[in-house]
Image (cartoon, rainbow, N blue to C red):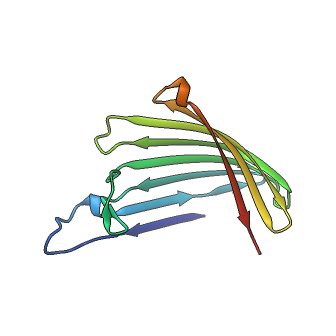
Amino acid sequence: EFLIEVGIPKWSPNEDTFGRGMFFILFEARLNIGVFSFIPTVFMYPDFYLQGPTNEGEQMDLNLKFHFSKEDAIINGGFEANGALTDSYSELNIKLSPYIGFITPGVLWQLKINATMLPFDINEMFDSFISINAQF
């Protein structure tokens, strides 16, 4: 399976120079083999979004997700690795995130701990994430 999405959030032909900073690009591929899924995702940020400039123009994120779950399992889990390159390609940010998820009637839960590996700062290294999604 794969998904590709390309868009131009803002373009005024009389004012803007056509370039790659005009685009956002999302590409995601999914490889499902039994209980294992491998999902690489690439996203390139645009210079403008929601009618305003961003500080992330042309920055790229790469996310690798390794997911383990049987199709009808109540509990699932996996591991994510996220890397981000700044627009000048001079700074690399890397996060590693193990997670566990479970399903209750009508609600999907996910608990994740993010460990920032680069840039290294022991005081800012860990944070947590809780996702609660209602499904009907």
Give the residue at the far left of this rendering. Answer: 14
Task: Residue 127: name its quadrant.
Answer: top right
The residue that appears at 28% across and 41% down in the rendered structure is: 88
The residue that appears at 41% across and 35% down in the rendered structure is: 92
Q: Nearer the viewer, residue 87 or 107?
A: 107
Residue 104 locus on image (x, y percent)? 85, 61
The residue that appears at 25% across and 72% down in the rendered structure is: 11
On screen, residue 67 versus residue 64, left or right, reads right
On screen, residue 6 versus residue 82, left or right, reads left
The residue that appears at 32% across and 53% down in the rendered structure is: 57
* In the depicted structure, whether residue 65 falls above or below residue 24: above
Give the residue at the far front of this rendering. Answer: 123
Q: Is residue 8 visible?
A: no
Q: Nearer the viewer, residue 5 or 21?
A: 21
Query: Is the C terminus in the top left, top right, bottom left or bottom right quadrant?
Result: bottom right
Query: Is the N terminus in the top left, top right, bottom left or bottom right quadrant?
Result: bottom right
* In the depicted structure, whether residue 11 falls above or below residue 65: below
Q: Is residue 134 visible?
A: yes
Residue 69 locus on image (x, y percent)? 79, 52
On screen, residue 92 versus residue 23, left or right, reads right
Residue 90 locus on image (x, y percent)? 32, 35
Give the residue at the far top of this rendering. Answer: 122
